[in-house]
Image (cartoon, rainbow, N blue to C red):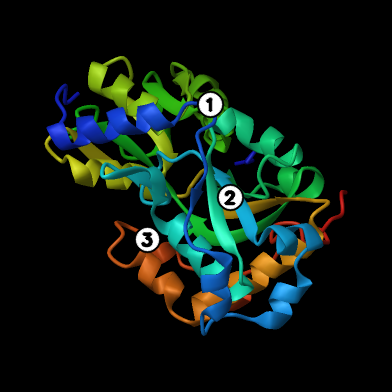
């Protein structure tokens, strides 16, 4: 198929975590820095040739600014004890790449609708957390560096009361999706062809600004399930199995997808340097350490030879087609 790509209670731990994430997920929040440029340059991982290949503005600043919405664990979220600093796979990998490149890493908490415009405006240098790789984006919007393969799943109330197992089971079901995401196109296509086209009721698709809002809607019973990248919702379900269940979905209606690091097309030196740094981070074991123990992520890992800029279209770095 073409791609455009209730438990009514929550544990106190999950409630507090979500409340914290709501507090920091307003469009823009202050910067968090993971390490100093001097520390990175002293690292045994430091690659002077890659550092020298960086844009002069990055070398002068001694930093690369990453943007993401800090509420999609295990990729990126916040710790209750340190709400101004992100944690997760993306921050861990970014630190590793920073050590290779000899720069410090800054993070900006950025709501999803503001991310691509913010990148184009130069508010951040890189997006790393919520970006899906698509043909359209590779060809005309940004350059994309894949960092993992991704699958999709459903978050339901504990026990999966609607007995949902595949996308076609969603006909007539109320489903939450992140606003402006690829998941919306997938659901729309399935609803049109597999549901309405087969004489079944359409999927009732509701858009939410981030995972926190979708979880709250599921808890309130206003949606029957949320549909999103498997790692994030699997982590939510695992954090409170008395309230939620995770349903891994078969890929019948979905092509292989990548989660990606996005860089503006006019910043080619940074794109190439980051791609090369990511290869080194995979080779030196940092990548495996970042994913260790993460629910359902073993099938998502990439090898250094799979780190190809714009892998779906092979669009040359910095070019538009």
Q: Secondary structure at mark 2?
A: strand
Tags 2 and 1 touching, CB below 8 Å: no
Looking at the image, residue 114 lies above or below residue 279: above
Q: Residue 26 location, x and y as percent?
A: 48, 26
Residue at (41% x, 64% y) in the render = 299
Looking at the image, residue 66 lies above or below residue 69: below
Q: Residue 250 location, x and y as percent?
A: 41, 49
Left or right relative to 239: residue 33: right
Looking at the image, residue 271 lies above or below residue 276: above
Residue at (44% x, 62% y) in the render = 92
Residue 23's disc number: none
Question: Would you call the spot at circle 3 few (<14 residues within 10 Å), some (14-19), or many (20 or more)?
Answer: some
Residue 297's disc number: 3
On the image, which quarter does residue 280 sit in? Answer: bottom right
Q: Who is closer to the viewer here, 264 or 45?
A: 45
Q: Residue 283 location, x and y as percent?
A: 51, 81
Q: Residue 6 location, x and y as percent?
A: 19, 23
Q: Secondary structure at mark 3?
A: loop
What whole-number distance in Å separates the C-alpha atoms at marks 1 and 3? 24 Å
Look at the image and tell me whether residue 248 can be seen.
no
Residue highlighted by disc 2: 66
Q: Which of labels 2 and 1 is toward the front? A: 2
Left or right relative to 229: residue 156: left
On the image, which quarter does residue 51 sit in? Answer: bottom right
Question: Would you call the spot at circle 1 few (<14 residues within 10 Å), some (14-19), or many (20 or more)?
Answer: some
Tags 1 and 3 touching, CB below 8 Å: no
Q: Quadrant of the N terminus?
A: top right
What whole-number distance in Å separates the C-alpha atoms at marks 2 and 3? 23 Å
Residue at (15% x, 41% y) in the render = 241
Residue 179's disc number: 1
Considering only order in the chain, which callout, 1 or 2, is on the residue closer to the N terminus?
2
Q: Who is closer to the viewer here, 69 or 244?
A: 69
């Amino acid at each position: 198929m073409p791609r455009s790509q209730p438990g009514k209670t929550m544990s106190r731990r999950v409630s507090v975590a979500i409340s914290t994430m709501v507090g920091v997920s307003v469009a823009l929040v202050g910067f968090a820095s993971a390490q100093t440029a001097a520390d990175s340059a002293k690292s045994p991982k430091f690659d002077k040739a890659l550092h020298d290949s960086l844009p002069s503005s990055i070398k002068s600043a001694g930093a690369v600014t990453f943007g993401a919405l800090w509420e999609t664990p295990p990729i990126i979220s916040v710790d209750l004890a340190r709400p101004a600093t992100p944690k997760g796979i993306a921050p861990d990998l970014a630190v590793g790449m920073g050590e290779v490149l000899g720069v410090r890493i800054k993070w900006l908490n950025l709501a999803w609708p503001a991310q691509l415009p913010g990148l184009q405006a130069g508010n951040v240098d890189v997006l790393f957390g919520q970006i899906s790789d698509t043909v359209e984006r590779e060809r005309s919007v940004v350059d994309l560096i894949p960092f993992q393969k991704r699958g999709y799943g459903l978050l339901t109330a504990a026990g999966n009361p609607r007995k949902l197992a595949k996308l076609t089971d969603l006909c007539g079901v109320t489903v939450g999706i992140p606003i402006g995401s690829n998941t919306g196109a997938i659901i729309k296509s399935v609803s049109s062809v597999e549901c309405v086209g087969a004489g079944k009721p359409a999927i009732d698709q509701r858009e939410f600004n981030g995972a926190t809002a979708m979880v709250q809607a599921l808890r309130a019973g206003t949606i029957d399930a949320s549909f999103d990248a498997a790692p994030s919702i699997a982590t939510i379900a695992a954090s409170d199995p008395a309230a939620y269940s995770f349903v891994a979905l078969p890929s019948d209606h979905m092509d292989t997808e990548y989660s990606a690091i996005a860089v503006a097309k006019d910043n080619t030196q940074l794109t190439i340097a980051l791609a090369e740094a990511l290869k080194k981070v995979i080779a030196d074991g940092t990548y495996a350490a970042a994913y260790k123990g993460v629910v359902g992520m073993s099938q998502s890992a990439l090898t250094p030879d799979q780190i190809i800029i714009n892998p779906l279209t092979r669009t040359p770095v910095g070019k538009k087609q």
